[in-house]
Image (spheres, coloured by chain):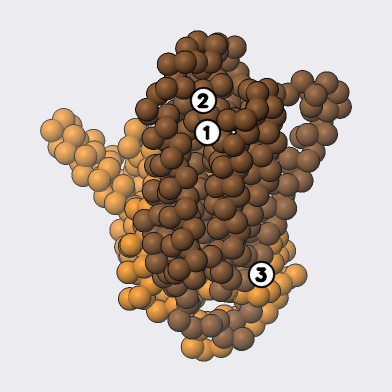
Amino acid sequence: MLCIFPPTRVSIGLRNLSSSEIRRSMLTQVIWWSSIALESLLLFRGFRGKLASRYPAFYFYIFFVLLQDLVCFAIRRSNSAKEYEFAYWTAEFLCVLVSCGIVLEIYRVGLAAYPGTARMARRLLGLIFVIVVVKTMVNIAVDPRWWTQATAKGVEGTLRGIQGVAVVSLVALFLFYSIPFGRNLRGIVLSYGLLVGFSVICLTFASSTASLRVQALLGFLYSAIYPVFLTLWLVPLWSYEANPLPKYPVPLEQEYQRIASATQRRLQDARSYVARAVGS
Amino acid sequence: MIGIPAALLLGTILLFLLLFVAARGSMGARELSSRSDVPLLDDDAPLDPCPSEIVARIFSSEDWEFVAETKSLQLEKLFRRERKLVALAWVHQTSMAIRRIMREHTQATRQSRDLHIATETKVVLLYAQLMFLCGALFLAIQSAGPQRARGLAVYADTLSQRLADAQHALQTVTAGPKFHGASSS
């Protein structure tokens, strides 16, 4: 994801203000090359530590971002800014779609040993999907020009928002059901969640303001912080560490309904206890 | 397109949740290695850490009337402060017990292959209501004192009756042998 605003794009964003200075900026080059270096290192460690086979969606995403960086860089060097911008937003849209795989991977890997919670997660994610589809249809019905008038940043912000809601739901389920995260998965979840949250805020602000200066600033901030997220991924994904598994399977005689009935009875007792005590 | 307030809200929630995950990361791993995953679900485990006679007195107006009769402001003040502390401690203990019930439930059900979404949602809602009730009691006691939390008590009692009826209806649908804990099934 995030190539969100790669340094070359920052140059474009700022060109109206001071393109020659920004293009020469050492900082821009540092961000650009450090992102490529960190992405390459992340991929190298992933293949070397056999993490890539365990988290294929995540590493495919990193590979895609790296490819996007290189391709966009090449286009920027050899073509006009307009062509670059078209290539960038096309690649960026694909990048957001590819990053949806990370949400599914968090669900798949994290809940593999917990079918009960996985079932809840499926329903919850399905519900979110339905709500998004319904809301989109309502928006289009109310204002048919809504989709065509939406800016690229607006669309990406919306997609990131959906990802953000999905991540919040998944993490809330993990916490509620006390599902333990392994070091690798926790690293992926933390950085990805922060990245999505940051993207949503940045893109929403950027698409809501008409000021080129503010847009350029947000774009630069977006790019500048990306190596930080890559580093946050790199540390926990340096080597493989298995997710903790439950030590004992649930005995067959403990069917869900019996467990739920017992819990409901105990909660009812608690309710009566509170009411009786206070009402005495 | 999402608005700025919604984006800020989503970003803030994400940040807090992820900070929570980061903070609980190592703690969760330690807990997992030291704690058995066999569900406890001891149906007969006592919920009330306080004897019922003592709890009944906390919210009763008898003691308050007795102290008021002494016409000692200092004594009244001391009594009010002490009684409030005891009541708050009781609410805290009760909410901890409720959380324990729910923790045991989630540890047992997270691996259930036959989890029923509707039933699970009802359990979660029941839990949320109870926690809300405890929170409201805490606030009421904190702001008005145990004696004046009676309005909430009446509400709790009514709610309790209504949910007991709903629970009865649910049990007729999902009737099964009484569950007495993991070892006795």
Q: Amino acid at mark 3?
A: Leu
Which chain wears brown? Answer: A
- CA distance for labels 3 and 2: 50 Å
Residue A256 visible in rendering: no
The orange-coloured chain is labelled B
Quarter holding the N terminus of chain B is: top right
- Which chain is indicated by disc 1? A
- Going 43% across and 16% down the picture, which residue do you hit? A21
Residue under circle 3? Answer: B115
Mark 1 neighbour density, 10 Å: few (under 14) some (14–19) many (20 or more): many
Task: State which quadrant residue B2 falls in.
Answer: top right
Q: Give the CA distance from mark 1 to mark 2.
A: 6 Å
Q: CB atoms at circles 3 and 2 under 8 Å apart?
A: no
Horizontal and vertical percent position of residue B133 = 48, 46
Q: Chain of mark 2?
A: A
- The residue mark sitting in front, 3 or 2, is 2
Residues under numbered marks 1 and 2 in contact, where contact means CB atoms less than 8 Å apart: yes
Which SS class for mark 1?
loop
Position of residue A46 in the picture relative to residue A87 (left or right) = left
Residue B56, picture quadrant: bottom left
Q: Position of residue A211 (x, y in %)?
A: 55, 11
Marks 3 and 1 close (CB-CB < 8 Å): no
Does residue A147 lie above or below A273 as drawn? above
The residue that mark 2 highlights is A10
Compared with residue B77, is residue A205 higher up or lower down, i.e. above or below?
A: above
Residue type, mark 2 in image? Val
Label 2 CA crowd tier, 10 Å (few <14, some 14–19, many 20+): many
Q: Which residue is mark 1?
A: A6
Chain where mark 3 sits? B
